[in-house]
Amino acid sequence: MTVKYTDIDYVVFTDAARYITQGQSPYLRETYRYTPLLAILLTPNIYLFSSFGKCLFAAADLLVGYLIHRILLLRGMPSKRALYFDALWLLNPMVANISTRGNAESLLGAMVLGTLYTILQKRQYFYSACALFGLSVHFKIYPIIYAVPLLILLDQHDTVPLPTIMQTYQVMRNRWMYSLDNQNAVQRSIKNTLSFLSPIRILFGVVSAAVFFILTGLMYQRYGHPFLEHTYLYHVTREDHRHNFSIWFYSLYLGMDHRSPWMGLLAFVPQLALVIAIGITFGKDVFFACFLQTFLFVTYNKVITSQYFMWYICLFPLILPSTKIQMKWKGVLLLAGWVVGQLN
């Protein structure tokens, strides 16, 4: 008996790419629930060879490994020691399996890690960080949860070249803050708000949003409402009672015969409340905040499949050096428990 290795998602990607090469909508392929950019990226599957996408995803895996290493070096870790933590991603069989079977999560991991790497070097790569963040949110909406820790990371004292309009805002903001009275509660609140709304934070939000809306607008202009429906809106109401690890699995399974649209929406309440609270509470440690946000977002999601774990696995090597977990008995037992929990 021949055992298929290629993930069904890869077949869907390739079919969508074929529609792109024919000048048609990728959404003619049923179950294609992604941005058209992914199908466009995979058109070499049609023009060159069918495994191009798998090679691209594997290359993205290597890029994530490189970015992990560079970030650890920026944080002051010796290169030799950083390699051990880098190996948690590069030598991870689960990561290699998911990418070589044809799943695109490594591309998103590269965008997220690229955002973190470039934002650490604000003066040199600030606009690159904005563009990558906007691109990652367009590609898959969940990275928007990182907005809070990223904005907190951008301290008001950070300096980057500002356009004229932001320089004008900086002068006016400083005047407003100087004129406010710290003894008055209302004015103190206004002053704290102005203090947070530094030019660099506003610029990051504006540029990132511009990239997101430009890409989204272009895709909407070309593919219309099916783009919005399948790329974003579908995931709000999506339910899967068959093959996932979600804590909502059993309640969704029991409710399949009498579905309520409120059930799917209510599931977002604890999920969003947790990720926002974590972002605010731990925002000064951007890597820990992003990891914990992602872990909780995945854990409380209505649908969980194995590739979702890659969303936080790529962040794990960045926070492990700051924890007390050692990869001896305790670390091995925790890892074994995590793996066993996925067996079915």
Image (cartoon, grey):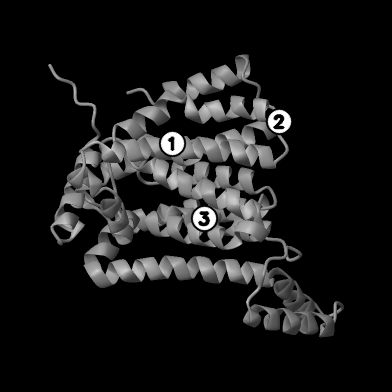
Tell me the residue that label 1 is attached to: 61
Q: Are marks 2 and 1 in contact (CB under 8 Å)?
A: no
236 left or right of 134 in image: left
Q: Is residue 1 above or below residue 198?
A: above
Tell me the residue that label 3 is attached to: 145
Which quadrant: the C terminus?
A: top left
At x 53%, y 69%, the residue is: 207
Taking the image as drawn, is residue 315 in sight?
no
Mark toward the start of the polypeptide (2 vs 1): 1
Residue 314's x, y, as percent? Answer: 51, 38
Tell me the tag on residue 156: none
Mark 2 or 3, closer to the camera = 2
Which quadrant: the N terminus?
A: top left
Q: Label 2's element? A: loop
The amino acid marked with disc number 3 is Ile
Q: Label 3's element? A: helix
The amino acid marked with disc number 1 is Asp
Which residue is most to the top?
A: 329
76 left or right of 112 in image: right
Q: Is residue 167 above or below residue 254?
A: below
Taking the image as drawn, is residue 208 in sight?
yes
Q: Within the image, what quadrant is residue 5 found in?
A: top left
Mark 2–mark 3 distance (CA, rounded to whole Å) = 31 Å
